[in-house]
Image (tube, grey):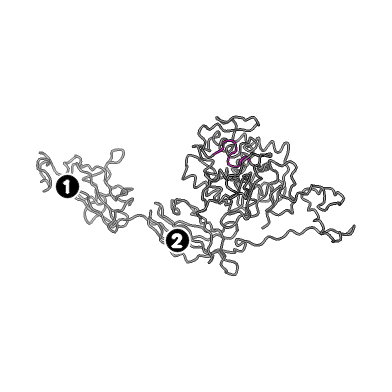
């Protein structure tokens, strides 16, 4: 789909209001450790920078960035607001599906790798918006790689930082100076140490949004910064690009995305138009191709025709398509004849555009015990309306609902590209400790088609055998306390059965499992007698040690029955007798017998 060009010339009061609101909300006070340099920019006063990092150029080499600010209206207009200011807000709030997926995956990865950083994906989205307009409106392929490289101007010291070539042109194609590269605009020297593989393909590619987003997250989380702290947040952003205006612009978009956003199909994101080095550059017209970066036009002067010797023409109004120049030797349009507006070429369909629905690709019944991996893996096939398989499409698998079941690695979301047969195979699913049904939903990234739900069942942990860990006779005097606590071991198929639910009951008789109303008992938290304990659980080694037992004044032989999920059961005899009336067990030392 053609990228949507948006032109928003918000100067004066509107710009000031947005920036002031965002900065007031997120950075009301100056962060500790931030100083103002001689050019009016801010520099972080870190005493232990990474050795590879140049303190005054940041991740991007202080390359140009987009200065467009978010609209003043809410990112969540009413459903009927399809035109006017509300429509602009909804358009700006939309983030291309694959790009949004990359930001959220990076946040999840950093939550596990650096939980103290508290990186919000909205910060990555704000930086991605300012650096590349969300990868040029989401012009990426199924793997997240930009359809054409995004390369900033060469950093030759002419209005920018001076950074001589560090990569032999490997990333930026320039063997003289460095350029910022990719949707998050890393300079090659920073990418060499900050680059990460975010999509698991074994490569670290600055032009891949998954790699770039994860790398930006790790870059922002270094030095032990906590991004939920206002001061650390400011320092992290300034370390990315050392400019007060850059800081305020990113904070504006961060605040805007925090209020709400939604995904839009890849390639349809709104493109920014104003850039920090935007002085006398040629602005793109609405008919410019989506791959053109602002400032990359033919070099003609605004207001003059392309051909030499022609009389000047008045500049066209913003949003009005200009008449393309005629080829040499071609008669011009006669005076008074209606002009034909240029035709915008229809972009070729991507594989994602052809997907009509998803089908179950042979996934059988999904069942696993709590804590175990499911033997079966979920398979979904992308198909056209005629049932033809579609390859190279991103399928997102999401575990839905209140459950601790996850994919391998602990994530609840996984994105997989369909193979040549149109099939995407989700990572192995691992059952959590909560028993019950779990739903996994498959959807097409960047395409609004109905999702496909898979039902998985988690069964509780079970044991098939229970034995005591000791054989000492359990004896107590009336009104006393049993010296030994009952401990049992649970197994399943001969292996320790850990985390298995169990119940202990002092039963009436071997044939009557109802709780006894006399004889030995446990105590609750208030010291009252209880003869049934529920909510017990074996430890990871299958062991369960019961609380202490007490006896009332009734003498005799009593029964304690322990049962587990899965049907394992064990009955233990308890004896209550006056001191000196019972014989010690054969294994006991006579000197330690009751009454000795």
453 versus 192 height, above or below: below
Residue 358 in the figure: left or right of residue 515: right
Residue at the (72%, 36%) spot, across then down: 13
Q: Is 54 a magenta residue?
A: yes
Residue at the (66%, 47%) spot, across then down: 92
How far from the left and from the top, in percent, is residue 552? 20, 42
How far from the left and from the top, in percent, is residue 252? 63, 39
Q: Residues within 10 Å of mark 1 (few under 14, many from 20)?
A: some
How far from the left and from the top, in percent, is residue 439? 48, 57
Q: The N terminus lies in which quarter of the figure? A: bottom right
Which residue occupies the extreme right position in the image?
A: 335
Q: The C terminus lies in which quarter of the figure? A: top left
Q: Nearer the viewer, residue 580 or 313?
A: 313
Q: Nearer the viewer, residue 355 or 549?
A: 355
Residue 513 in the figure: left or right of residue 449: left
Write down the region rendered in magenta. 53-62
The dot on residue 589 is none
- Name the residue beneath numbered marker 2: 377
Query: Element under label 1?
Result: loop
Residue at the (57%, 69%) spot, across then down: 388
Q: Is 201 a magenta residue?
A: no
Q: Nearer the viewer, residue 146 or 21?
A: 146
Which is more foreground, mark 2 or mark 1? 2
The quadrant holding residue 431 is bottom left
Q: Residues within 10 Å of mark 2 (few under 14, many from 20)?
A: some
Dot placed on the residue nearer the N-terminal end, 2 or 1? 2
From mark 2 to mark 1, how far is it between C-alphas?
49 Å
The dot on residue 472 is 1
């Amino acid at each position: 789909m053609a990228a949507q060009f948006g032109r928003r010339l918000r100067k004066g009061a509107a710009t000031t209001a947005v920036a002031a609101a965002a900065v007031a909300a997120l950075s009301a006070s100056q962060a500790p450790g931030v100083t103002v340099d001689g050019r009016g920019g801010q520099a972080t006063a870190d005493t232990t920078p990474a050795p590879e990092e140049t303190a005054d150029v940041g991740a991007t080499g202080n390359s140009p960035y987009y200065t467009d600010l978010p609209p003043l209206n809410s990112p969540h207009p009413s459903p009927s607001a399809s035109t006017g200011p509300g429509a602009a807000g909804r358009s700006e709030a939309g983030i291309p599906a694959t790009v949004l997926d990359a930001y959220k995956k990076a946040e999840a990865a950093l939550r596990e790798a650096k939980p103290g950083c508290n990186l919000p994906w909205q910060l990555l989205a704000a930086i991605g918006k300012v650096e590349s307009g969300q990868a040029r409106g989401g012009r990426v392929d199924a793997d997240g790689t930009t359809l054409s490289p995004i390369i900033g101007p060469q950093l030759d010291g002419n209005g920018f930082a001076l950074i001589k070539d560090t990569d032999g042109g490997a990333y930026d194609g320039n063997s003289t100076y460095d350029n910022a590269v990719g949707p998050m605009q890393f300079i090659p020297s920073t990418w060499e140490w900050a680059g990460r593989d975010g999509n698991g393909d074994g490569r670290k590619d600055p032009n891949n949004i998954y790699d770039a987003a994860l790398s930006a997250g790790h870059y922002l989380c270094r030095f032990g910064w906590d991004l939920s702290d206002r001061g650390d947040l400011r320092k992290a952003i300034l370390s990315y690009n050392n400019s007060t205006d850059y800081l305020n612009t990113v904070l504006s978009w961060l605040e805007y995305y925090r209020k709400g956003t939604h995904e839009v199909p890849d390639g349809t994101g709104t493109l920014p138009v104003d850039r920090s080095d935007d002085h006398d550059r040629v602005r793109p017209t609405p008919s410019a191709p989506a791959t053109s970066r602002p400032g990359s036009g033919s070099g003609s002067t605004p207001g003059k025709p392309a051909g030499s010797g022609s009389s000047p023409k008045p500049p066209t109004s913003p949003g009005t398509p200009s008449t393309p120049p005629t080829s040499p030797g071609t008669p011009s349009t006669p005076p008074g004849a209606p002009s034909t507006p240029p035709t915008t070429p229809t972009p070729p369909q991507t594989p994602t555009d052809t997907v009509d629905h998803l089908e179950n690709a042979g996934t059988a019944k999904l069942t696993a015990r709590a804590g175990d991996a499911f033997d079966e893996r979920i398979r979904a096939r992308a198909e056209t309306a005629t049932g033809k398989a579609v390859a190279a499409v991103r399928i997102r698998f999401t575990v839905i609902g209140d459950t601790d079941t996850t994919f391998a690695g602990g994530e609840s979301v996984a994105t997989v590209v369909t193979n040549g047969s149109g099939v995407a195979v989700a990572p192995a699913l691992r059952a959590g400790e909560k028993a019950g049904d779990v739903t996994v939903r498959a959807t097409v990234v960047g395409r609004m088609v109905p999702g496909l739900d898979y039902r998985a069942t988690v069964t509780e942990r079970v044991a098939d055998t229970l034995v005591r860990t000791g054989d000492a006779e359990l004896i107590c005097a009336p009104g006393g306390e049993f010296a030994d606590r009952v401990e049992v071991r649970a197994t399943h198929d001969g292996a320790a059965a850990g985390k298995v639910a169990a119940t202990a009951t002092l039963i009436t008789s071997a044939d009557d499992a109802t709780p006894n109303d006399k004889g030995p008992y446990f105590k609750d938290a208030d010291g009252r007698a209880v003869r049934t304990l529920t909510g017990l659980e074996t430890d990871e080694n299958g062991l369960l040690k019961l609380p202490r037992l007490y006896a009332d004044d009734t003498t005799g032989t009593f029964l304690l029955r322990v049962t587990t999920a899965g049907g394992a059961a064990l009955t233990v005899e308890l004896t209550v007798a006056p001191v000196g009336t019972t014989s010690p067990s054969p294994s006991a030392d006579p000197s330690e017998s009751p009454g000795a």
